[in-house]
């Protein structure tokens, strides 16, 4: 190929737009996921988060928050009946409730989330709404209110059935809403709980830990069906930022893979994000000229450190510090007066803004003033000379009059 053609092609390639690949976790097994930073109200990672999928027992997040918001007395007891038990699918995970035994609403709430008890969620549906159908209707009403536009519920447990689906995006909306309820958050972040009949239930994240330390997973709800695969929702804190995450569709062949993925996500955000100092207190932002003074330039400096939560290898070229204010100062500008503002940006986003207050006394330099305003001085001298001449004439006239008297 002719060298000239090669050069032209190379230049054309440089002009073509390209996508910058964002920092993303690797080595994960889920098919869909969203990681949401609640502190900054931003999605940090999204893998097909808007695609509908089976969600298995993540359904019980909705079942539980609705129940919590409709229970008047958590110590009130509910008898687990044969009718309730008959509605629990044989393949569903259960907490181990016994027919004929009575349980408090608190028992049923914890038994629904921790061991993912379909027996507990069924008991909640019957005791609070009279039937599963009534409860499911309320679940879909809640979905509409929360703008979960790609969600539809058919049962209270998450068992596989046509027309029962959601998305990671919708489940993040649900979990964010649910965690705003202190009771739900307390249940969601509990790992073990003893029911009033002495039965101890524990979070499925412990059962599926595979020997891994799961203390960093502060709250969780897992789910599994053959169609949905291994699913998990988690709450964690990384570098003082609160996160929630939902992952769907990890291979069902491994009972621990969704928990391993969750721990991998936490490690990823631990290692790759931090509160970055983009401007230090005392950094010189701009030097403003000072006229007719012994001070030649006034240094506008940052009043405090400005930080932003960013990728550790953030693009320094996207940091912008902007001074907007007086472009020249003089002795008429008084100490303590506001002379402008400093704005701090990252990638076009305003992070902070500071008023600039003059913190020195600007004294005039007489010689510099005279040089700067020479025409004024000249006019003043001419005026003085003119006055002096008039005064001399008047004095001569007076002397002349006296001489002839």
Image (spheres, rainbow, N blue to C red):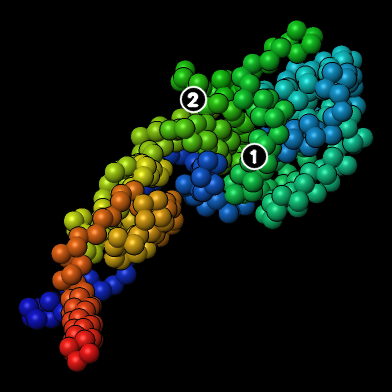
Name the mark on residue 223: none
> Height in image: 188 above or below 283?
above
- Residue 202 pos. (x, y %): 64, 18
Say which label, 2 or 1, has the lower sequence index: 1
At x 84% / y 46%, what residue is drawn? Answer: 137
The residue that mark 2 highlights is 216
- In this view, the residue in front, 9 or 173, is 173
Q: Quadrant of the C terminus?
A: bottom left
Q: In which quadrant of the rendered view does residue 298 lie?
A: bottom left
Q: CA distance from mark 2 to mark 1?
A: 18 Å
- In this view, the residue in front, 348 or 375, is 375
Determine if residue 316 is in view. no
At x 47% / y 32%, what residue is drawn? Answer: 240
Q: Secondary structure at mark 2?
A: loop
Label 2: how many Cα within 10 Å (few below 14, some 14–19, many 20+): some
> Height in image: 318 above or below 199?
below
Q: Secondary structure at mark 1?
A: helix
Q: Quadrant of the N terminus?
A: bottom left
- Residue 93 pos. (x, y %): 69, 26
Determine if residue 362 is in view. yes
Which residue is outermost to the left?
Answer: 3
Q: In which quadrant of the rendered view does residue 331 lie?
A: bottom left
Label 1: how many Cα within 10 Å (few below 14, some 14–19, many 20+): many
- Left/right placement of residue 151 relative to residue 393 reads right
- In this view, the residue in front, 105 or 222, is 105
At x 46% / y 19%, what residue is drawn? Answer: 213
- Left/right placement of residue 207 relative to residue 278 reads right
The residue that mark 1 highlights is 175
- In this view, the residue in front, 118 or 382, is 382
């Amino acid at each position: 190929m002719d060298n000239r053609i090669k050069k032209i092609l190379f230049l054309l390639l440089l002009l073509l737009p390209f996508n910058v690949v964002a920092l993303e976790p690797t080595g994960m097994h889920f098919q869909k996921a969203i990681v949401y930073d609640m502190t900054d109200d931003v999605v940090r990672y999204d893998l097909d988060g808007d695609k509908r999928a089976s969600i298995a027992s993540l359904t019980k997040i909705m079942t539980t928050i609705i129940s919590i918001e409709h229970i008047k007395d958590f110590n009130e007891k509910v008898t687990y009946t044969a009718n309730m038990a008959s509605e629990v699918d044989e393949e569903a995970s259960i907490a181990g409730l016994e027919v004929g035994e009575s349980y408090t609403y608190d028992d049923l709430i914890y038994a629904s989330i921790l061991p993912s008890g379909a027996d507990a969620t069924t008991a909640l549906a019957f005791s609070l709404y009279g039937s599963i159908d009534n409860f499911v209707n309320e679940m879909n009403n809640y979905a509409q209110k929360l703008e979960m536009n790609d969600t539809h519920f058919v049962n209270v447990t998450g068992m596989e059935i046509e027309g029962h689906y959601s998305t990671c995006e919708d489940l993040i909306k649900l979990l964010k809403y649910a965690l705003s309820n202190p009771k739900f958050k307390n249940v969601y972040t509990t790992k073990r709980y003893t029911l009033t009949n002495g039965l101890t239930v524990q979070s499925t994240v412990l059962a599926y830990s595979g020997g891994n330390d799961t203390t960093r997973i502060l709250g969780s709800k897992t789910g599994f069906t053959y169609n949905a695969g291994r699913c998990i929702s988690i709450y964690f804190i990384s570098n003082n930022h609160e996160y929630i995450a939902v992952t769907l569709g990890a291979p069902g062949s491994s009972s621990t893979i969704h928990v391993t993925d969750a721990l991998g996500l936490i490690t990823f955000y631990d290692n790759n994000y931090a509160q970055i100092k983009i401007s230090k207190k005392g950094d010189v932002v701009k030097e403003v000229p000072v006229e007719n003074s012994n001070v030649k330039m006034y240094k506008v400096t940052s009043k405090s450190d400005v930080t932003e939560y960013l990728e550790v290898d953030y693009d320094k070229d996207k940091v912008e510090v902007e001074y907007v204010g007086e472009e020249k100062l003089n002795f008429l500008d008084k100490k303590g007066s506001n002379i402008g503002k400093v704005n701090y940006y990252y990638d076009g986003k305003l992070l902070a803004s500071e008023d600039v207050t003059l913190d020195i006394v600007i004294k005039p330099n007489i010689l510099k003033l005279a040089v700067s305003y020479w025409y004024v001085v000249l006019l003043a001298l001419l005026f003085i000379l003119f006055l002096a001449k008039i005064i001399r004439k008047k004095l001569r006239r007076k002397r002349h009059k006296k001489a002839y008297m």
